[in-house]
Image (tube, rainbow, N blue to C red):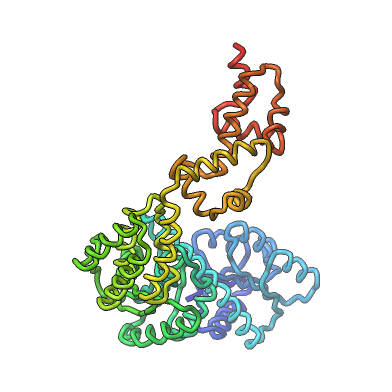
Amino acid sequence: MFYAMVIEDSKPIARDIKRQVEAAHPRVRVTAVVYNGLEALQLLKEHPVDLVITDIRMPRMDGLTFIAEAKRLRPQLKFVILSGYSDFDYARQAIQLGVSEYLLKPLVQSELSTILERLVSEIETKRRIELADQIAYNLSQEDPNKTFEMPGHWQGFCLAVIRFGYFKTGNIALNREELEHHVRNHFSDLECIVADSPGEAEKIAVLALSEGQSQSIDENMMTFHAFLKSVHPLPFLAYSPEATSSHQIAPLYRMLSRHLDHQVKPGMPQCWYVERELYGNRMQNSDSFEERAKTKCIALIKNGRQSALEEELDALAKHWESTRASIFQIKAGLNAMFHAALPMYHPDMVDELLSTCESYADISRKAMDKLSPLMEQSEPRGQIIQQIDDFFRANLHRHINMQELSENLNYSATYIIRVVKQSRGMTPIEYFNKMKIDEAKKMLDSNENIMVKDIADALGFTNQHYFSKVFKQYTGCTPSEYKNRRTH
């Protein structure tokens, strides 16, 4: 329902406007009728409404003055001016105040209906966006004390989590507005809100339910999921039983998202009705075959036996397929294998690998593609670091980016970053800057008359200010302060 205020100094005309407004739109109710702008302004402070239909010429405070004051009090209010005067100056002032419509008396019912339909649509859209933002904020804060009101006319709602790809992160979901458009088309008899999830690969749909509608939601969800498969290769959907309070949204989201974590399978987009929490924080256990296969794979990786490893990974993938293992279980197995066998292991490595797999067979092939170069590069880490050190020392006088470093060392940028982070605890560029600052300290120590600008130029910094900023970042003081400490 949408609530309106009518301001008109003639009581009979005010009553007639109220009747016409409520007849023009079934969801608009006039909850306040007042007879001048000053009275309306006072009432508005305690009696919020969605839109105001006001006359212009009234005693005590005219309509245009009221609108200017009311907008400061409630910026989101919609205004319709209804006047017997067609003076252009009134219209011009109304436009400057952001008035939605300017109508002349007597009212034409069809024009009023059209205007109210448009205003109701604008208000409704804004409400949906605000509620979607509140839901997203509530989930991102994970604070049960932060709550919000669901639409008062909703008897209940169903929550759905829509995931694009295997994981809640590392992929991009459909645009929120685009997805809401699809949801509204497929659930045309239900009001809905689509909100962002804490994971960028997920979205949340909240569907209003009236009595009896929860019985037909299953078929609609299946139909909607079938549509999603036409716009994304791997959509997964989990939805909840009917709920009634905004307090339930966060726990329902966690339940549904966790269900997707545990149930998503390679290349098999699915839709689930989830009635209760099945997993909590428990991990799925791998079976004895998987444990033996992982142990054997680790030994083969450490011994550099690529052909035997390829056969073992194929057997493991076939076992996962025969047992319909979930991505969750496969990820845990590969993580344990990669972590135990590879000094260059990074947690994102397995997620990146699995995100491109469309079948169980893909997993063994792409795991081998990932492991082969790492097996070749896992031994000479000290040698690689030495090459990086040598290259940096030879180029302290200029600027270097990751592309140049990668091309000169003939390793990928991702691999170099991983090696330097594990060996030096910082990114390659941070490490290069540290080497430059160490050299700058030597120059300051050996020559008390040297200029800071000359050091910045010698070490390839774009300007003295940037050099001083980097110097302070690594030493806690500016070059000048460092110089003064040395001389006192």
Residue 18, given in percent of the width and then of the height, sits at 56, 79
Residue 51 sits above or below residue 138 on the image: below
Give 151 or 462, whichever is nearer the viewer. Answer: 462
Residue 150 seen: yes
Q: Can residue 263 be seen in this view?
A: no
Q: From the image, which quarter does the C terminus lie in?
A: top right
Can you tell which quarter of the image residue 145 is in? Answer: bottom left
- Left or right: where does residue 125 sit relative to residue 288? right
Left or right: where does residue 64 sit relative to residue 43? right
Q: Quadrant of residue 208?
A: bottom left
Q: Position of residue 114 (x, y in %)?
A: 62, 84
Task: In the displayed orientation, state which residue is furthest to the right.
Answer: 88
Is the residue 192 above or below the residue 465 in the image? below
Q: Which residue is drawn at 50% across and 81% down?
A: 231
Residue 176 image point, x, y percent = 51, 71
Q: How many labels does the image show?
A: 0
Q: Is residue 222 above or below residue 263?
A: below
Taking the spot 65% from the left edge, 33% from the top edge, the residue there is 467
* Residue pictured at 53% horizontal, 82% vertical: 22
Q: Residue 236, how many percent across, how many down? A: 39, 76
Residue farthest to the top, as pictured: 488
Determine the residue positioned at 62% across, 60% down. Answer: 71
